[in-house]
Image (cartoon, coloured by chain):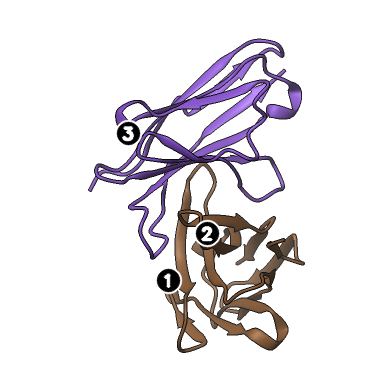
Amino acid sequence: AQSVTQPDIHITVSEGASLELRCNYSYGATPYLFWYVQSPGQGLQLLLKYFSGDTLVQGIKGFEAEFKRSQSSFNLRKPSVHWSDAAEYFCAVGVSGGYNKLIFGAGTRLAVHP
Amino acid sequence: EAGVAQSPRYKIIEKRQSVAFWCNPISGHATLYWYQQILGQGPKLLIQFQNNGVVDDSQLPKDRFSAERLKGVDSTLKIQPAKLEDSAVYLCASSTGTGGYGYTFGSGTRLTVV
């Protein structure tokens, strides 16, 4: 069955430091992969997505993610974190054949220290 | 373009009472989704509509939850009777239904059952 694992529940970084959020997926076919961000009281906003092609994907707000098939991973990175990046981040896998159903991980809550 | 509208934003009810949530998707979006997001977990798909037909309701607790999408536009999700474990944020999303997973999420309804 398809699943997504985000090993880190909480991460705290200092402003200006680099960030990497981990995501591992389980899916039989070539996956469609996504990262979403959720600020308090807000809906989910798409940061970036991977369908095929270049395994390094650029997204909004300076985020990027790298798809590694051999490791079943799709880790999210940012070279320099801003205080406004504090939020919850969700990795998701798209299930084809069912009108674009998404399966989400449990999320990683990011705190940013000044 | 206008986003996905949801109401109410917050609702507090006692267990065994009933409650209804409303969602107005982006105009022209054929696919509508209801997700349940329990605190500390990622969103879980409850039901998915394509126009006014149900595509996937495999994770909808049908003994207490019901949903409809009249005329393929607005949708209502109902819980009757509510249980304590139904406390969650209920997210509505819509998409064109074609490839690309172009989801747009609403801000959600936070339900607290006491």
Q: State which chain disc 2 sits on.
A: A
Q: State which chain disc 3 sits on.
A: B
Between residue A19 and residue B98, name the one nearer to us: B98
Q: Label 2's element?
A: strand
Q: CA distance from mark 2 to mark 1?
A: 11 Å
The residue labelled by disc 1 is A61
The residue labelled by disc 3 is B72
Please name the residue shown 51% across and 54% down the image.
A98
Q: Label 3's element?
A: helix
User: Is residue A70 in view?
Assistant: yes
Where the N terminus of chain A falls, by quadrant?
bottom right
Residue A96 in picture, x, y percent from top left:
52, 63
The residue labelled by disc 2 is A37
Chain B, chosen colour in render: purple
Please name the residue shown 36% across and 41% down the image.
B4
Specify the amino acid type for callout 1: Lys
Q: Give the quadrant of residue A61.
A: bottom left
Residues at discs 2 and 1 in contact (Cβ within 8 Å): yes
Between residue A77 and residue B16, name the one nearer to us: B16
Q: CA distance from mark 3 to mark 1?
A: 34 Å
Residue B110 in picture, x, y percent from top left:
57, 31
Foreground: disc 3 or disc 2 = 3
Specify the amino acid type for callout 3: Gly
Q: Label 1's element?
A: helix
